[in-house]
Image (cartoon, grey):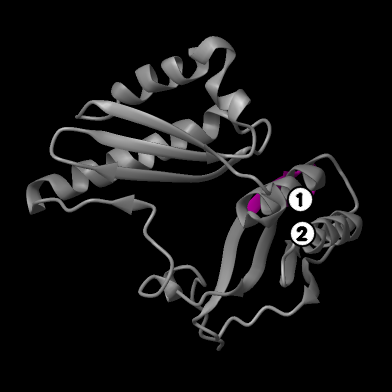
Amino acid sequence: MGQKVNPISFRLQLHKNWDSRWFAPKRDFAKWLREDIKIRQLIEKRFESRPTISRIEIERSANLVTVTIHTAKAGVVIGRGGAGVTELKAAIEKIASLPIRINIEEVKRPELAAKLVAENIARQLERRGNFRRAMKMAAQNTMNAGAKGVRIQVAGRLNNAEMARREKIIEGSVPLHTLRADVDFHTARANAPGVGIIGVKVWIYKGERVD
């Protein structure tokens, strides 16, 4: 059996970081973890119609929870006159046990964010798009944006086939065993009509980190 590990958690000691950053006493740990999961689910659900959220970071201090939303379309999250952020903050404060501060950071090149690429392919598959064309276009756009390599894999009943199978496309190089390599990874699920769930995995290699 192959022994696989998430490329991001594999590099946490070097140049990656946790998406939730806080320390909790034993009595509060489960409560805070539940809050983090609910906050992420709420934000993702609010913008699930179009994939714009690249990453959600949650940082806790003694009297504040800071939620940083990395998005490809900041205007969609902020809303007209900041109304979107105000509504989102009010909704999150109903979940969290501490006051909330929301930061919005714009992703300059969404083609280099594995989460956005994976969700974009998943949405195309849900609209009965051809999986090979979706994979090829996504890989080409990622390479054109400056990536050193990209690997995309889809699995399920592709093109309405009776038997599930796995297909992948690789452009450039994706050195998964090199710890210095800056590899972004994410998965997405497409609820394709008539065939069930199709899984999408995306690895994007952005070059070696020297810091």
Residue in the image at 81% along x and 62% along y: 139
Regarding mark 1 in the picture, which secondary structure is present there? helix
Residue 85: image location, x then y, percent: 46, 20
Q: Is residue 117 left or right of residue 98?
A: right
Residue in the image at 29% along x and 38% along y: 35
Instruction: Locate the C terminus and report the quarter of the image it occupies.
Output: bottom left
Disc 1 versus disc 2: distance between alpha carbons?
Answer: 12 Å
For the residues carrying marks 1 and 2, which lies nearer the camera in this image?
A: 2
* Residue picked out by circle 1: 121
Q: Nearer the viewer, residue 207 or 194?
A: 207
| Predominant SS of the magenta segment | strand
Mark closest to the chain's N terminus, 1 or 2: 1
Residue 136: image location, x then y, percent: 87, 61
Counting other residues with Cα less than 10 Å from the Cα at mark 2, is it few (<14), some (14-19), or many (20 or more)? Answer: many
Q: Tell me where residue 192 sits by quadrant.
A: top right
Regarding mark 2 in the picture, which secondary structure is present there? helix
Q: Tell me where residue 2 sits by quadrant.
A: bottom right
Q: Amino acid at mark 1?
A: Ile
Instruction: Locate the N terminus and report the quarter of the image it occupies.
Output: bottom right
Q: Is residue 8 left or right of residue 97?
A: right
Relative vertical location of residue 208 with respect to residue 117 in this rendering, above or below:
below
Q: Amino acid at mark 2?
A: Thr
Q: Is residue 32 left or right of residue 127?
A: left
* Residue picked out by circle 2: 142
- For the magenta stretch, what is the residue range? 188-197
